[in-house]
Each structure stands twice: as structure tokens, then as C-alpha cells.
Image (cartoon, grey):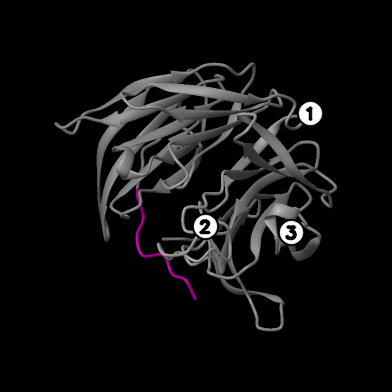
């Protein structure tokens, strides 16, 4: 059973849409409809506001921490069509250092790629396109765009692990340097799609289209590499269903194994895997957070439930 170990009073003036811990678990970033991003130092039950980042002209939907090997920075996306990159100076001051303005509508989802993949940021928009920023050093970025990625808008993006499932992470083996540049997306067209970078053409191509949802796909989450040969994606839908998609050979893109993990009574908004990739957290319109784990028989079991309206 999971328990609430602390509560952070953010003092946002409107609804909070996202909250993300940094890789060390020492800092918490939050974003809100009040157009701000706030960063807190967190230590057990103690927390301190260290930055209030203002620069968006609309509700801020999502935030994503850059891996510290590339710098102490984070990204935010908003209804104002912008993605803003923020970084911390040596003196502890946070400021805007790059603004990405190429989308024609709200940018709903962003995520940095795993560090071994490179300095990439995927951005999904209501205009149906996905843009992928690539850092080249000295705070400079270029980007590629996937037009018409989802015809009625992109709601979510999630990167694959940098090394394909089943890869032997041994420097003496030939597949040690194999890097997977893939990510999944979900949209208002009821589809989950898998995208792969074609090095020969220098462009992103759709590798697989996963059909099964009957309403808007609200979130997708690619599971971390667990050392097994199977890749796993979780997706959730406006109709309350959570699907588990699995693929044993990414190069063949045979994502034909689908399981309905659970059907909830309300819309499911967000999914998040544990670091080990064996527990899936689910949150939705019922204001509950549930944790799920697969049994040895293949059934998904709820191992914890937390009602956020009653959390202290």
C-alpha cells in the first residue's frame, strides 16, 4: 500500500496540470493554468519555493526535466503554442534561454529523450504535428517536424528507452552501441503511433499504428527497459480504458499483443511507469491514483489506491 509522505502547498492561483520530480528527487516542478512554472526544493516533509517562472501567455500543460548531463534545465509547454526552455545559472537564478514557436495551436505534451539517445525534445500539438528539437550545444537547437502525425491533434508523447529491449549492455558486444531513436504518440484520432528516426533520410517515419481505442488517447507511456526482450507501451483513453501493448521485435514492429489492463469509470488522464518498469501509476477524472502490477499469470492487479481528494 502506497502512502502520502508529504504535501507541497504550491500557492498556484489556478488548477495544477503537471508535477515532475528531477532525476535526484530533490526538486519538484509544477505548472498551472495561472501561466506559471514553480520549482521547489524538497526534503522529506520540508519544501521551499526557489523559482517562479513566468513567460507563457496561457495555461501551462506539462513540464519535463532535462537530464543533468546536459545541464540543469527544464522545458514547459502551453496553450499559447509555445515551448519554453528554462535553465539555472551558477548563482541559482532561473531564466528563459530558448523559445520554440512553430506550432499553430496548443502544445499539449513534451518529453526529453533518454540521455543516451541525445538531446532531443518531442513536442505534440493540437495542430496535429509533432516537432522534435535537437540540441547542438551553446543553447542552440534545430528541429524536425512530423506533419499530420494525428489528424485531430496530439495529446501525448513518450520516448522509448535508448537501448532496445533485449540489448546486452556489455561494451564488448556488438550491440552495445545500438541506440534506439523511437517514441510513441497518442492523439484525438483514437490511435497510438510509434515513430522511428531514419538516419539515411534524416527524418522521422511512422513505424507502427496501434488501433484499439474507441475515443481520444489521453496519454502514452513507454516502459523503461527491464532487461527482457519485450517492449511495452501503456495507453489510456477518454473512455476509461487502459491498454498494454507489447512487441517482441521492434524492427518488425509487430505490436499485435494488446491487453485491456482495466476499464475505469471515468476518463484516464495520465500514466507513469516506475523506474524498474514493473508498476504502472494511473490517474484520472475520479481524482484517484492507482498502482498496478502484472501477476505471474499475466493479469494486472491493483496494488494500491489513493484518493487525492482525501490526501492529507
Quick check: 193 above or below 128?
Answer: below
Q: Where is residue 163 drawn, in percent x and y?
A: 52, 55
Q: Is residue 297 left or right of residue 70?
A: right
2 vs 3, front mark: 3
Number of dots carrying numbers: 3
Q: Which residues are magenta?
A: 1-8
Quick check: 188 above or below 254?
Answer: above
Q: Quadrant of residue 165?
A: bottom right
Q: Where is residue 197 drawn, in percent x and y?
A: 62, 37
Q: Is residue 204 left or right of residue 176?
A: right
Alpha-carbon span between mark 1 and mark 2: 34 Å
Q: Residue furthest left?
A: 91
Whichever of labels 3 and 1 marks the residue nearer the N terminus, that label is: 1
Q: Quadrant of residue 255?
A: bottom right
Q: Secondary structure at mark 1?
A: loop
Q: Residue at x 18, y 34 (%)?
A: 92
Quick check: 216 above or below 138?
Answer: below
Q: Secondary structure at mark 2?
A: loop
Q: Is residue 147 magenta?
A: no
**Label 2–label 3 contact, CB within 8 A:** no
- Residue 95 in sight here: yes
Q: Which residue is mark 1?
A: 151
Alpha-carbon span between mark 3 and mark 1: 21 Å
Q: Residue at x 61, y 41 (%)?
A: 157
Q: Which residue is mark 2?
A: 308
Q: Secondary structure at mark 3?
A: strand
Q: Is residue 3 magenta?
A: yes
1 vs 2, front mark: 1
Alpha-carbon span between mark 2 and mark 3: 23 Å
Question: Dot 1, crowdedness within 10 Å: few (<14), some or many (≥20)?
Answer: some
Q: Which circle marks residue 243 in the picture?
A: 3
Q: Quadrant of the C terminus?
A: bottom left
Amino acid at each position: 500500500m502506497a502512502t502520502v509522505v508529504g504535501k507541497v502547498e504550491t500557492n498556484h492561483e489556478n488548477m495544477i496540470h503537471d508535477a515532475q520530480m528531477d532525476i535526484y528527487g530533490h526538486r519538484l516542478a509544477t505548472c498551472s493554468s495561472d501561466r506559471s512554472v514553480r520549482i521547489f526544493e524538497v526534503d522529506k516533509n520540508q519544501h521551499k519555493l526557489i523559482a517562479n517562472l513566468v513567460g507563457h501567455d496561457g495555461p501551462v500543460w506539462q513540464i519535463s526535466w532535462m537530464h543533468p548531463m546536459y545541464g540543469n534545465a527544464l522545458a514547459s509547454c502551453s496553450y499559447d503554442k509555445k515551448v519554453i526552455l528554462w535553465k539555472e545559472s551558477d548563482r541559482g537564478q532561473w531564466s528563459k534561454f530558448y523559445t520554440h514557436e512553430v506550432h499553430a495551436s496548443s502544445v499539449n505534451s513534451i518529453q526529453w529523450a533518454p540521455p543516451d539517445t541525445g538531446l532531443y525534445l518531442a513536442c505534440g500539438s493540437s495542430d496535429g504535428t509533432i516537432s522534435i528539437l535537437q540540441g547542438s550545444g551553446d543553447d542552440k537547437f534545430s528541429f524536425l517536424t512530423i506533419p499530420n502525425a494525428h489528424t485531430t491533434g496530439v495529446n501525448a508523447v513518450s520516448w522509448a528507452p535508448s537501448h532496445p529491449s533485449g540489448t546486452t549492455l556489455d561494451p564488448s558486444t556488438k550491440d552495445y552501441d545500438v541506440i534506439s531513436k523511437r517514441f510513441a504518440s497518442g492523439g484525438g484520432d483514437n490511435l497510438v503511433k510509434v515513430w522511428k528516426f531514419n538516419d539515411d533520410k534524416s527524418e522521422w517515419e511512422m513505424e507502427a499504428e496501434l488501433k484499439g481505442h474507441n475515443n481520444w488517447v489521453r496519454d502514452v507511456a513507454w516502459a523503461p527497459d527491464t532487461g527482457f526482450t519485450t517492449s511495452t507501451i501503456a495507453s489510456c483513453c477518454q473512455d476509461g480504458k487502459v491498454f498494454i501493448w507489447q512487441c517482441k521485435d521492434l524492427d518488425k514492429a509487430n505490436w499485435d499483443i494488446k491487453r485491456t489492463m482495466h476499464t475505469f469509470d471515468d476518463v484516464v488522464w495520465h500514466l507513469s511507469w516506475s523506474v524498474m518498469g514493473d508498476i504502472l501509476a494511473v490517474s484520472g477524472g475520479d481524482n484517484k491514483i492507482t498502482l498496478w502490477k502484472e501477476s505471474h499469470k499475466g493479469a494486472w492487479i491493483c496494488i494500491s489506491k489513493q484518493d487525492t481528494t482525501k490526501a492529507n
